[in-house]
Amino acid sequence: MDPLSIEGAWVVSPPIRADARGSFHELFRGDQLLGTIGYRMDVAQANCSVSRLGVIRGVHFADVPPGQAKYVSCVSGAILDVIVDLRVGSPSYGQWEAVRLDDQDRRSVFVSEGLGHAFMALSETATTVYLCSTAYDPAREHGVHPLDPAIGIAWPARSEPILSEKDAAAPSLAQAREAGLLPRYSDCVAYAASLRGQVRRGTADCMPSSV
């Protein structure tokens, strides 16, 4: 796993074993993720979306705690996957980074709690699978407009990107901050630390006591 420029986001480039039958790769390794981020990602829900060319989904995020971490893979076609730092007080607040995910390189992206996530379909159809650390709860999930010029995501040029009604009506970054919707960086750091603490306590509980 390689860290991206935004703290809390990583890209995973798995080895691909190919032969006359096709190919094989490991889509997700919980132990690898644990070794990198220091806590376990409990998969509470797995989503699969099929999007046509030009569709943009996001920018989505959830209240922290507990937030919603995501492990995102494009299993068919190609997408431009985008991570946006929405954490108020973060050194990279308002910044974004994009990674191409496709069915050739088979890369995945891990997006930790508190970060915003979006993607755009780059192929005629794109099938995206994302593992989520918490189940969908509309009461604590929010969005920021993906075309907000204050964020300035460099989406591939299209005459008119395709958005859902909900995403098209999402507030700007400034409006979401003014409304108190955005997560705070300090809360995200504290929550991640609490998850790492659970792992350390669990490890200590498993160690044999001295005689």
Image (cartoon, rainbow, N blue to C red):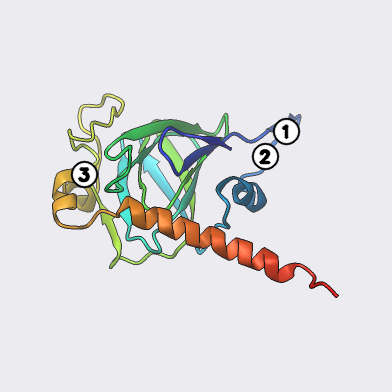
Q: Which residue is mark 2?
A: 25
Given the current orientation, which residue lies at the most extreme bottom position? 211
Instruction: State if disc 2 and disc 1 touch (CB < 8 Å).
Output: yes
* Amino acid type of the residue that numbered disc 2 sits on in the rendered structure: His
* Amino acid type of the residue that numbered disc 3 sits on in the rendered structure: His
Q: Alpha-carbon distance for marks 3 and 2?
A: 34 Å
At mark 3, the secondary structure is: loop
Q: Is residue 119 above or below residue 202?
A: above
Q: Nearer the viewer, mark 3 or mark 2?
A: 3
Given the current orientation, which residue lies at the most extreme front position? 211
Q: Which residue is mark 1?
A: 17
Q: Which residue is mark 3?
A: 145
Question: Which residue corresponds to the image point at 30% horizontal and 54% vertical from the top-left?
Answer: 184
Q: Is residue 73 above or below residue 187?
A: above
Q: Is residue 123 visible in the rendered structure shown here?
A: no
Question: Which residue corresponds to the image point at 19% horizontal and 58% vertical from the top-left?
Answer: 180
Q: How many other residues sit within 10 Å of disc 2, few (<14), some (14-19) or many (≥20)?
A: few
